[in-house]
Image: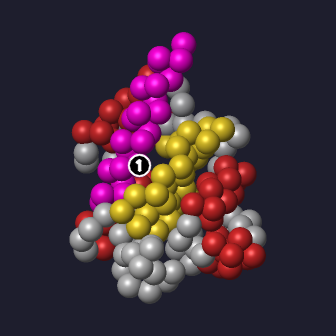
Amino acid sequence: MSKTLNEVGELLIEKKLTIAFAESATGGRLSADFSMIENAGTFLKGGIVCYDACVKEDLLGVEPELIQKYTPESIEVTKAITEGVGKMIPADIHIGVTGLTCPGGSETKEKPIGTMFIYGQSGNKTIFSERVRFIGSKKKIVKAAVKACGQFLLSYLQQLDELK
């Protein structure tokens, strides 16, 4: 368990905020890692693994045209799965992750393996919308994406204090 995720968990508890995930490329790793944080039951509402496009469409309500236009691995689809999980699981913060962890999919020269999309939303407000790239095995890419998501969340939660 990373120090960053523990800090995020502590801040979620302190601020009495809840979180839910829509995970494609990370395959439930974010939800699993967050569930291992002490007192996770006070902030973790749940997560949905939407690895296949049909799950994105049928369960999370992503329009097939959006996937066809932008590909399943895009910030547009990542935003849509985040909004979809928001309709299914009430929480203060919703996070979506898509990306390319292995050959295939929508891989191109401009969008190589290791390209990940991480989207965060609180209510109707975008809290972060990031395209990042990691190098390494599928396992390393997923771990790096989880870590990056933790860092984005930590920055957002720390910034909440500054806005007061």
Secondary structure under the numbered disc 1 in the rendered image: helix
Camera-nearest residue between 41 and 127: 127
Q: Residue at x 62, y 56 (%)?
A: 79
In the image, farthest residue toward the front? 110
Q: Is residue 153 magenta?
A: yes
Quadrant of residue 30 within the rendered picture: bottom left
> Percent position (x, y) of residue 52?
57, 78
Residue 22: quadrant of the picture? bottom right
* Depicted 15 relative to depicted 57: above or below: above
Look at the image and say whether residue 118 sits in the magenta stretch.
Answer: no
Mark 1, residue position: 149
Image spot of residue 122 (x, y percent)? 62, 38
Which stretch is magenta?
142-164
Q: Residue at x 25, y 39 (%)?
A: 3
**Residue 16: horizontal and vertical position, in percent?**
52, 26
> Does residue 163 appear in this view?
yes
Q: Residue at x 40, y 58 (%)?
A: 132
Res. 45 visible in picture: no
* Outermost residue toward the bottom in this view: 104
Residue 163 drawn above or below residue 149: above
